[in-house]
Amino acid sequence: MTGDDEAAFDEFLAGGSTSLLRTAILVCGASRHDAEDLVQYALEKVYRNWPRIRHDNPEAYAKKIVVNAAISRARRRKVLKEITFSRPPETAADSPDLDLRDTLIGELRRLPPRMRAVLVLRYWEDQSEQATAALLGCSVGTVKSQAARGLARIRENLQVSEEVTR
């Protein structure tokens, strides 16, 4: 890489690493340590391909790597165990209702990895349906159906837990 490429990569790291870590934590549903491993893996791939991707959308490329790696890791596991779920990094736009956020993160954790990835990218990361489909390598229709099913499951689970507490 040239010096210009190195400087551009350093700028990319400074601007996007927190967002990438937050995405990794939410998508993989694992501990901060596991999410950091995914981010490290993604950044290594981004660095190796930096001269080719730097003028496109390196953040989307990195998120795609994180999401695909998280889904692949979940697929490799024959038996899914409940794992510790860490809080996402604090941001300036944090909601004052932390209980609601914790509840929603808990519900996200209960979803299958691909459905969780769709919801995180669409609604937490505020990606369009087209951008989410591109990141996940699927059709827009798949994104729409996975989002609808995931939201329906979360709503159903929240209604059931609300009825139980009454």
Image: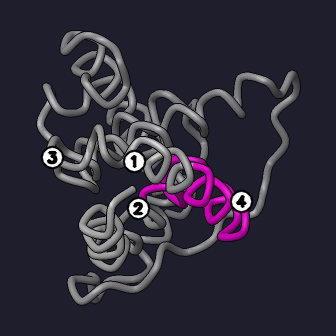
100 w.r.t. 51: above or below = below
The magenta-colored residue range is 23-41
Q: Which residue is mark 1?
A: 62
Q: Which residue is mark 4?
A: 34
Q: Quadrant of residue 20?
A: bottom left
In the rendered structure, the answer to whether residue 82 lies left or right of residue 59 reads right
Locate residue 133, reporting x and y percent: 25, 23
Compare residues 105 and 23 and report the one nearer the observer.
23
Cβ–Cβ under 8 Å for marks 2 and 4: no
Gap between marks 2 and 1 measured at Cα: 8 Å
Characterize the magenta stretch by its predominant secondary structure. helix
Residue located 48% across and 66% down the image:
21
Q: Is residue 33 magenta?
A: yes
Disc 1 or 3, which lies upstream in sequence? Answer: 3
Compare residues 55 and 32 and report the one nearer the observer.
55
Q: Which residue is mark 2?
A: 20
Gap between marks 1 and 3 measured at Cα: 14 Å
Cβ–Cβ under 8 Å for marks 2 and 1: yes
Residue located 41% across and 47% down the image:
159
